Image: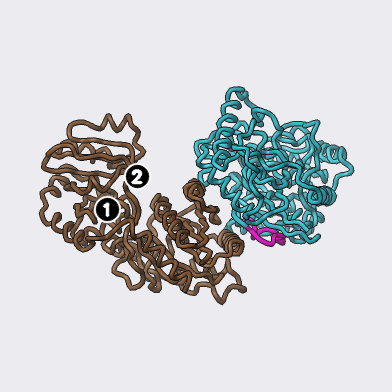
Chain colours: A cyan, B brown
Amino acid sequence: MGRIAFAWELGAEFGHAVACNEIARKLRGRGHQVAFIFRELHQIDFLADCAADEIFQAPVSLVEGKGLENPASLADILVGCGYDSPQHLAGILGGWIAWLRRWKPDMLVSDFSPTALLAASVLGVRRVNYGNGFGIPPRMSPLPAFRFDEPVPPERLARSDAHALASVNGALARFGVAPLPMLAQVFASDEDFLATFPELDSYGSRPRTGYWGPRYSVDQGVATRWPAGAGKRVAVYVKRNLAQMDSLIEVLAGSTHRVAAFIPELEPQRVARLRSASRIVSERPMRLGPLLPGCDVFVSHGGNVCVGTLMAGVPQLVFPSQYEQYITARRVEQLGAGLWLQPQSTAAEIRAAMERVLYDPSYALNARAYARRYPAYSPAEAQRRVMKRIEELLAEPPRHRALPRLDGAPVLPRTPS
Amino acid sequence: MARILCAWEYGADLGHVRRLVPVAEALRDLGHEVSIAFRDSAHLEAARSRGFDAYVAPLLRIPPFVNPAPANFSDVLLNIGFADLHSISGALRAWRSLLELLGTQLIVADYAPTAMVAGRLAGTRMVTIGTGFALPPPTDPLPALRPWAPLEEGVLRAHDDRLVRTIREAIGPAGAGRAPVRARDIFAADAHLLCTFPELDPFAPRDTGEYVGPQGDASSGEDLRWQGTAAHRIFAYLKPRNERFDAVVAALHALDAECIVAAPGLGHERASALSGGGVRVVSAPVNLDPLLAEASLCITHAGPGVAARALAAGVPMALLPQHLEQFLIARRIEQSGAASVVRPDTRQPDFHAWLASLLADASLREGARRVAEAHRGHSFGEATRRAAERISQVALA
């Protein structure tokens, strides 16, 4: 049986931990050893049932995003997350390498974990990308822009890409490893589990890449039923720091809708304002299976759960809190399957958007039409295929050798002698 | 030989790295297997490049609100993330995994409270190391950090209780037997090594703790020499971003003294613009000892590193502490008679008059000489080896 490490290095949403946990649980059930090495450890407490045998802190920069305005490409994000200098990156990369050599995974599952991938490539460890597309860029040089609603000068892309690549190669040199020809090679993997479909991919359709379908679960979490009554059914999955939280609560509390809301660590005063006989407020993730069939709108930030519940034909109301979610929100809007709101939107605007999605039948029709494009998809089947492919790869020798040494010496040993 | 993990979590000063990495090297020289865990990944390379496996210490979420004037050390910990049940719970799990993965037998904790709670739960031997601030005296409740400021009844106890309650809840019933009962339990260790002089220890005199003395190599900076024959020589080591920096440099220009100002990070252009007459401003670290040996006065923020060098050299100090830790150190030096302090919360004083009066103050010179005399023979280089030997002793006991 294999040792499998799930790494989550970048991106600050609960969905990363949840998605890793689902695959991890299946692998562990088949006898594999599982470790999580995550950027945010507090999320572990919110997992319905943590599947990892061991949990570690992912090496990350403490000054993420400092001096970084409006990133346009993944290279911009990397420069803001430790790829600013060879010195900084070497420390983070060294942290990953030290950990990989100690824990000795047979496979690294990277959820938006570029430096973990780089460390695995230094050591020749099998590795796969698992994510919704944003953290798995097309392997182009320079890395392409994801920003689509304003022009991005090509020289800016090239400059950021070169900056990040210089940090990568400077750091690699400190480990005696030969330079990479292009930044995109950081993301080289044995498999990309692109957990979305082309309509919602942050980088647009990628014809030569397989899509594995959204990653979300309908069978995990607290068993929850819609409250009795005749009101519309509104599911809410947002973080408590949602800019429009008080307005959203005002809209929901002032309506006749039935509500099932998961808002981790929501302050007691706000819980008191939202909760009622027809409005459930859960501290824990809710089991979506029983909720989705009658759900009239799903309210979220635009992460995995948005992309996932759309597959159940549920129209969406999206409150994007960063650019990745904004891309998804715009794609949902283009599909006609939902609307999205600006951070500064008022209660009146939120109410109007919610009413439109609830009472204009085109949103539900378009959501169902989109879901019907992928009749073979189910969240459980998508997970099963990912799990099965991981086991296939484990049974094969690693496809990538360790990166070559600068001095032509044999590659770094995978384990300490 | 033992498997030792040297952990540093909090405190932004480079002093932690400069203390812990040499101690780790000395421990390795003694035959131990040593790993490093730092919270700030920006410093990992400093350890890795010396041949250590360097890990990131488990991180707590940074709280949205903090008390700008913490009442005691429990309050300090609540401020840096210990009020967050889910963070503590996750971090303790991650520490446990790391300690088991490395087979750690002893933790050297340099302001590493989460590591210490994890080590306590795992039954790992522990030694704390630091300059005193991060090791409050083990009273119950933990003592006030501003003993001069009035506090409401029960405030200290309330912070202690909240801290211990959160940690115990995060640990859960399975670990309850080893969980801390009092806030002071969080800091319990097999030995406490104070890499400072008692005159610089914010909590001296104290019953627990061994003074191994300040350590380290201060010769890595630029080598400057006094040039003139002025009556007074003033050495200043200041942060260029400090709000009082410009006023101090202006005051120096008006004094009849040769002045050297080290302001790392200032930038060469500004440094040359501020230089002239008897004042030389440099934007790089400088080799301290040759300058201090012949200085009449040292102006500094009372960071423990520079203050220890000035103290050992018998140089009177003019202190401009920027935050609580530096203020507590400054107050101690003032009590010993070797310094004068401008409190961080006082309005801009007349620096020229203040500095001129200090240059003329014979009792201050005598105070500084007396303290230096008490520590004659202290070797900064030897302190690292002594600390490592003491740690080794605990590891092998």
Q: Residues within 10 Å of mark 2 (few under 14, many from 20)?
A: few
Q: Nearer the viewer, residue B18 or B283?
A: B18
Callout count: 2
Indicate whether residue A193 is drawn in magenta: no
Residue drawn at point x = 79 percent, y = 35 percent: A209
Q: Is residue A350 visible?
A: no
Residue drawn at point x = 81 percent, y = 44 percent: A311
Q: Is residue B140 left or right of residue A133?
A: left
Of helix, strand and loop, which one carries label 1?
helix
Residue A304, compared with residue B365, is above or below; it is: above
Q: Residues within 10 Å of mark 1 (few under 14, many from 20)?
A: many
Q: Chain of mark 1?
A: B
In the orientation shown, which residue stands out farthest toward the right? A375
Contact between labelled residues 1 and 2, with CB atoms less than 8 Å apart: no
| Residue A117 picture location, percent across and down | 66, 44
Indicate whether residue A53 is drawn in magenta: yes
The span shown in magenta is A42-55
Say which mark, if any, is on residue B220. Answer: 2
| Residue B328 picture location, percent across and down | 30, 59
Instruction: Please state, as top left, top right, bottom left or bottom right, where the N terminus of chain A lies in the image.
Output: bottom right
Q: Is residue A21 visible?
A: yes
| Residue A357 picture location, percent across and down | 75, 40
Three-letter code for the amino acid on which mark 2 is drawn? Ser
Q: Which residue is mark 1?
A: B309
Q: Is residue B277 left or right of residue A261?
A: left
Three-letter code for the amino acid on which mark 1 is drawn? Arg
Q: Chain of mark 2?
A: B
Residue drawn at point x = 50 percent, y = 36 percent: A67
Residue drawn at point x = 51 percent, y = 42 percent: A88
Label 2 and label 1: CA atoms lie apart by: 14 Å
| Residue A116 picture location, percent across and down | 64, 46
Q: Earlier in the sequence, mark 2 or mark 1?
A: 2
